[in-house]
């Protein structure tokens, strides 16, 4: 075997125990269910959960969370709410500033959501990579479902259910998403949110689209002065 291949094999073997140890440490406070897709959670969702200060599975708290690049909805004994947020973009880069809008859910909304979860048996549907007929692509919207009960934690996701063929799991997820949007009045609250975002250019979840706040020439001039002053300070 050539020397460079021997060296590559050595480092591959050397790194395996480190990865396993890191994974074990990250999950030492809870037990993952077999259908959970942990790689997706740690790579894409955990940083956002931390930024929004939502419940993390390491905490000794029960919760249900439904999320996407549209909003993050969380039910728990502490609070029932959903969050919409925007990361500021300046000079084609994130500035580190984030605008977060929290909408508290009413008892009626919480009750409707819980009944919907139970009726559709949402927590029994496996993650999309375990569903035979589920297809994947590069563009689209991914929905995540998290459930923490005691020390059991489940994390599942579904890539663009509206792009799937019509079968039981895709139909169920599509119906759930549509109903949740209706229950929490998402369309109306999102319109209000867009008007309130204090940034000229912003993004959400690092997706490939930027939302731009349309302001007049005078406001934009003042905004640039504000950004320059803030940068110098």
Image (cartoon, grey):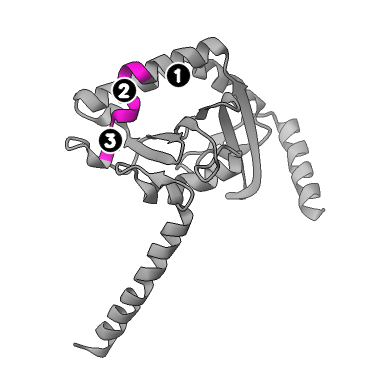
Question: In front: mark 1 or mark 2?
Answer: 2
Give left or right: position of 103 versus 25: right
Residue depicted at x 26% and y 27%: 170
Q: Earlier in the sequence, mark 2 or mark 3?
A: 2
How dense is the environment of label 3, judged by Cα within 10 Å: few (below 14), some, or many (20 and up)? some
- Pinpoint residue 156: horizontal percent, then vertical percent: 35, 38
Per the image, label 3 sits on a secondary structure element best described as loop
Q: Could you say where residue 81 lies in the image, as x and y percent from the top left?
A: 57, 24
Residue 34 pos. (x, y %): 30, 44
Q: Quadrant of the N terminus?
A: bottom left
Q: Quadrant of residue 172?
A: top left
Return the residue at label 1. Answer: 181
Q: Is residue 73 magenta?
A: no
**Residue at x 78% of width, y 48% of height:** 230
Residue at image position (57%, 26%) is 77
Q: Determine whether, in the image, residue 43 is placed left or right of residue 233.
A: left
Name the residue that disc number 3 marks. 126
Q: Secondary structure at mark 2?
A: loop
Name the residue furthest front.
Answer: 150
Q: Earlier in the sequence, mark 1 or mark 3?
A: 3
Q: Residue furthest bottom?
A: 3
Name the foreground residue: 207 vs 128. Answer: 128
What percent of the width, then of the height, locates residue 188? 54, 15
Q: Gap in Å between the C-alphas at discs 2 and 3? A: 11 Å
Q: CA distance from mark 1 to mark 3?
A: 22 Å
The extreme top residue here reads: 108
In the picture shown, does residue 175 fall above or below 70? Answer: above
The boundaries of the magenta stretch are 118-128
Residue that label 2 marks: 121
SS at badge 1: helix
């Amino acid at each position: 075997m050539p020397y460079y291949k021997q060296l590559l094999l050595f480092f591959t073997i050397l790194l395996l125990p480190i990865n396993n140890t890191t994974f074990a440490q990250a999950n030492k406070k809870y037990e993952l269910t077999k259908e959970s897709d942990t790689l997706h959670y740690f790579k894409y969702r955990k940083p956002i959960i931390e930024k929004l200060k939502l419940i993390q599975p390491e905490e000794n708290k029960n919760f249900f969370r439904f999320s996407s690049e549209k909003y993050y909805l969380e039910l728990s004994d502490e609070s029932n709410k959903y969050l919409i947020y925007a990361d500021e973009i300046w000079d084609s880069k994130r500035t580190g500033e984030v605008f977060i809008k929290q909408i508290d859910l009413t008892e009626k909304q919480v009750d409707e959501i819980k009944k919907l979860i139970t009726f559709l048996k949402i927590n029994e549907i496996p993650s999309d990579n375990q569903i035979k007929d589920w297809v994947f692509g590069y563009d689209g919207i991914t929905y995540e479902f998290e459930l923490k009960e005691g020390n059991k934690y489940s994390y599942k996701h579904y890539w663009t259910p509206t792009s799937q063929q019509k079968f039981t799991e895709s139909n169920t997820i599509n119906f759930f998403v549509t109903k949740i949007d209706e229950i929490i009045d998402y369309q109306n609250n999102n319109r209000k949110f867009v008007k309130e975002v204090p940034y000229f250019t912003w993004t959400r979840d690092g997706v490939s689209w930027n939302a731009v706040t349309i302001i007049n020439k005078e406001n934009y001039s003042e905004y640039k002065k504000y950004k320059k002053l803030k940068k110098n300070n």
